[in-house]
Image: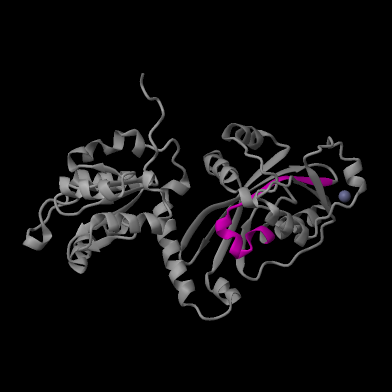
Amino acid sequence: MTDRTPPVPVKCLVWDLDNTLWQGTLLEGDEVRLPDEVRDVLAMLDSRGILQSVASKNDHDMAWQKLEQLGVAEYFVLPEIGWGPKSDSVRRIADQLRFAHTTIAFIDDLPAEHAEVTFHLPDVRCYSPEQLLDLSVLPEFAPATVTEDSRQRRRMYQANFRREAAQAAFTGPDEDFLRSLDLVMRIARAEQEDLARVEELTLRTSQMNATGVHYSDAVLRDLCEDSAHDVLVISMADRFGPHGAVGVLLLARNAGFWHLKLLATSCRVVSFGAGAVILNWLITQAHTAGVHLVADFRPTDRNRMMEIAYRFAGFTTDPCACLAASGLPPNADIQRMHLVPDRRNEPGTMRLITEDLSTT
Ligand SMILES: [Zn+2]
């Protein structure tokens, strides 16, 4: 019998340096050489959203300087260059990324290092430099979909490390820190290429998903084509770099009322008040269009925070004539929350770049 279960995808590959990434031994004074094929592997894995790090027994400053000289330092997150056991280095990298050991790969030319890592971290997969040129065709290094967010994943992590460090060093009120980020939120109609990341968001956002419903790529594709629906994707960035796609909003615009069928946001942006900013933007749009808002909410055991966001924005379960005339079929699972829109203030903590739904 053959095992047809696909291998667990690798989320981070940890590189040895001497005679693995480059040819030669730095501390022995070799003029180390980075083959073009290895450079291509670095770029290829990076473009697929697979993070890369370093576990090397070397002088830290010298090795990092060499990576910079070779023009590849930017590819590596959380490098571990020093004299401790490699299993400790790999473990620290996994811990800081919050990745399971099953998603970490390690490449090194020395069998003794494979053995040391395998002994302490049996779930980490080890590779030798002979396999380097085959990595791109191994299924564990070939994610099923590569989205815009995969391509910028490494930059998102690097931005997040810098942002967290800046926040830890910031002594003023949280609100002042938020303002210092120069946050920008973009709300745009989803293009076909956005749908994979929107699907991923509806899967991953259990705490901030108003209905707990997972929309598949195929269903979203149909909704995008359907002129009665708007699928809006929300992305954010700040002075440290991109946050990527952080929310999705599914709206049916009917005469007299707009029906918010789904709002889901990533828990990564809860602290920025992203949910309230999106709701207030939508409320102002509906006010300009002269329509009421009806929002579906289905309580799950995880999404109480989203109910609070809706109630805080002013949604209630009070009856309204628009609901009675809506023709929406009653649904025992779903609460239809309602709001008579007014004009809301622009957020003080971020700049919005948005579609104008009220005129299109
Ligand atoms: Zn109404």
Q: Residue 170 lies in magenta, yes or no?
A: no
> Between 191 and 210, which is closer to the camera in this rendering?
210
Q: At which x and y percent is residue 202?
A: 60, 44
Left or right of 317? Residue 98 is left
Is residue 33 in view? yes
Q: Quadrant of residue 74?
A: bottom left
Q: Is residue 110 among what the camera can see?
A: no
Colour treatment of the image: one colour
Answer with left or right where residue 124 lies relative to residue 225. Answer: left
Q: Is residue 193 left or right of residue 65?
A: right
Give me the residue at 65% from left, 71% from top: 348
Quick one: which residue is furthest to the bottom in this view? Answer: 172
Q: Which residues make up the magenta segment?
A: 257-276
Q: Is residue 259 magenta?
A: yes
Quarter of the image where the N terminus is located? top left
> x, y (%) of residue 237?
52, 60
Q: How many marks?
A: 0
Residue placed most toward the observer, 316 or 261: 316
Q: Residue at x 25, y 49 (%)?
A: 117
Task: Tell me the quarter of the picture where residue 83 sits.
Answer: bottom left
- Residue at 91% x, 49% y: name it: 320
- Taking 181 as reference, is 274 above or below it? above
Which of 173 and 231 lies nearest the eye of the viewer?
Answer: 173
